[in-house]
Amino acid sequence: MLHAVPSPPLEVPQAPARIVTGLYLRCLREANGVLLKEVAAAARVSTSAVSRWERAESPIPRDALRTLLQRYGVARKQTEFLVRHMPLQSYGRGQCAPQGLASRAPHDHWADVADDEAAARYIAVMRQASKVVQFCEGVPAGLRTPAYQNLMLNPDVCVVPDEPVLGMPSWVHQVPWAAKQQRTVLLDERLLTNGGSQAAAVAAQLRHLASLVSAEDPRGGDLVVRILPLSRLLFVHTVGSVTEVTLHGHRMVVSIGLFPTYETGSRVAQVVSAGLREAVEAAWSREETYEGLVRAAEAMERRAAS
């Protein structure tokens, strides 16, 4: 059973910068071994207030954000970047009419261009989300063999790593995958034939994916892997790899290119969510996906041996 992308919520969405920064604060606190009461004392608020900031259930004042980031040893340049992009405490999306062709209100869209810290925040979002539905042109983080991982994270081709690598901020290496994360991965059908000079590594990766599909609970499990065919062109085929995550009850559309971007509430987010729902419905069945992966692995192995 695939985990369908839910319809857009009726409530006013939170700004993505608040959602991602809230998670960032929690990850920093836990990585530094700081108790919630210590953070609350530094910010001169209650522990429940800090908890709400970390879960983006209430806006964090910019002065408090600066205080906490300094408490965790975040560099001044990084701190000021986040403070500058944080909506004012009094800001609410409902106060602003959507603008432009994309029907975006201010703060619906956030481009996190803060280099390694941005990549680390993206990794934390993907790992800590309670629900993930993603269309991928390559095999995503968490599902790779070591050899395929080396191919994907090759610095010559990988601009923004989606797994912790040497040189990234230390805190991200401590971020675990969420327990019982519901994850649906839709793989582009072209993955079955793209091997090139790395056919042996790709063949092993395809067999690993087939084993994951075989191990799925047919009654509905935490991980679902499916192939999205090219028999008809879908919206997601035109936009490339894209994901919708649910984090602390907030839904965001997430993409990564030269830097991570996040979107909530806008017409863009609604269209992408609808595109992912369409893709889930169009994906191959479990049996078709398993058989397709095995056939592709066999063909790739023959190519590698020739």
Image (spheres, rainbow, N blue to C red):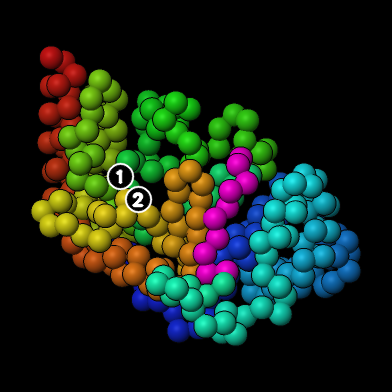
Q: Hey, what amino acid is under mark 1?
A: Glu
Residue where numbered disc 2 is placed: 241
Residue where numbered disc 1 is placed: 137
The label shown at residue 6 is: none
Identity of the residue drawn at 29% across and 33% down: 205
Identity of the residue drawn at 52% across and 83% down: 97
Q: Is residue 237 magenta?
A: no
Which SS class for mark 2? loop
- In the rendered image, residue 50, in percent from the top left (x then y), is placed at 75, 68
> Callout 1 environment at 10 Å: few (<14), some (14 to 19), or many (20+)?
some
Q: Earlier in the sequence, mark 2 or mark 1?
A: 1
Magenta range: 107-116
Q: Is residue 200 visible?
A: no
- In the rendered image, residue 80, in percent from the top left (x then y), is placed at 75, 54
Spatial CA span between label 2 and label 1: 6 Å
Q: Hey, what amino acid is under mark 2?
A: Ser
- Is 270 placed left or right of 66 in the picture? left
Return the residue found at the far front.
Answer: 100
Identity of the residue drawn at 16% across and 51% down: 229
- In the rendered image, residue 44, in percent from the top left (x then y), is placed at 89, 69
Which SS class for mark 1? loop
